[in-house]
């Protein structure tokens, strides 16, 4: 993973906060905005931080939902074969294995 300076991280976080505000996030109402703003303020004040990519976890989470979105010719959902929880567990194990390879 590419190392970025505290300043670069804060610039990216400011841009993300601006996008959230443009989408209607309000500090007193939006829990995600509040949490992210708290992290931003802590890093700005000198707190230690670690940047970690969650892309693989996000891909696995969305991939696990694909079977639930399939519709047949009769416009009824096609039930996935097997247990959807097993799909999630397998995807999670795969992500952990990929993360182990990166280190």
Image: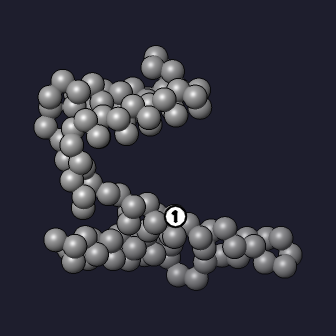
**In the foreground, 60 or 50:** 50
Answer with the quarter of the image where residue 74 lies. bottom right
Q: Is the residue 36 above or below the residue 49 in the image?
A: above
Where is residue 65 shown, x and y percent of the image? 55, 66
Q: Is the residue 50 above or below the residue 79 in the image?
A: above
Where is residue 36 shown, x and y percent of the image? 36, 33
Residue drawn at (48%, 29%) of the image: 18
Q: Is the residue 33 above or below the residue 64 in the image?
A: above
Where is residue 39 shown, x and y percent of the image? 28, 32
Q: Is the residue 88 above or below the residue 27 in the image?
A: below
Residue 16 seen in this snapshot: yes
67 lies left or right of 44: right
Where is residue 48 shown, x and y percent of the image? 13, 37
Image label count: 1
Residue 35 seen in this snapshot: no
**In the foreground, 28 or 69:** 28
Residue drawn at (27%, 25%) of the image: 41
Name the outermost residue toward the bottom. 81
Name the outermost residue toward the top. 28
Residue drawn at (51%, 32%) of the image: 20
**In the foreground, 33 or 50:** 50
Residue for badge 1? 62
Secondary structure of residue under mark 1: helix
27 lies left or right of 71: left
Q: How is the image coloured?
A: one colour
Give neighbour class at mark 1: few <14, some 14-19, many 20+ (Cα, 10 Å): few
**In the foreground, 13 or 100:** 13
């Amino acid at each position: 993973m590419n190392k970025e300076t505290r300043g670069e991280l804060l610039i990216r976080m400011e841009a993300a906060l601006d996008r959230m505000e443009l989408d209607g996030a309000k500090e007193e109402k939006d829990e995600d905005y509040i949490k992210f703003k708290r992290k931003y303020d802590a890093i700005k004040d000198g707190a230690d931080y670690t940047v970690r990519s969650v892309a693989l976890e996000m891909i696995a989470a969305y991939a696990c939902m694909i079977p639930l979105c399939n519709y047949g010719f009769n416009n009824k959902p096609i039930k996935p074969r097997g247990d959807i929880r097993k799909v999630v567990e397998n995807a999670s194990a795969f992500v952990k294995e990929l993360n182990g390879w990166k280190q």
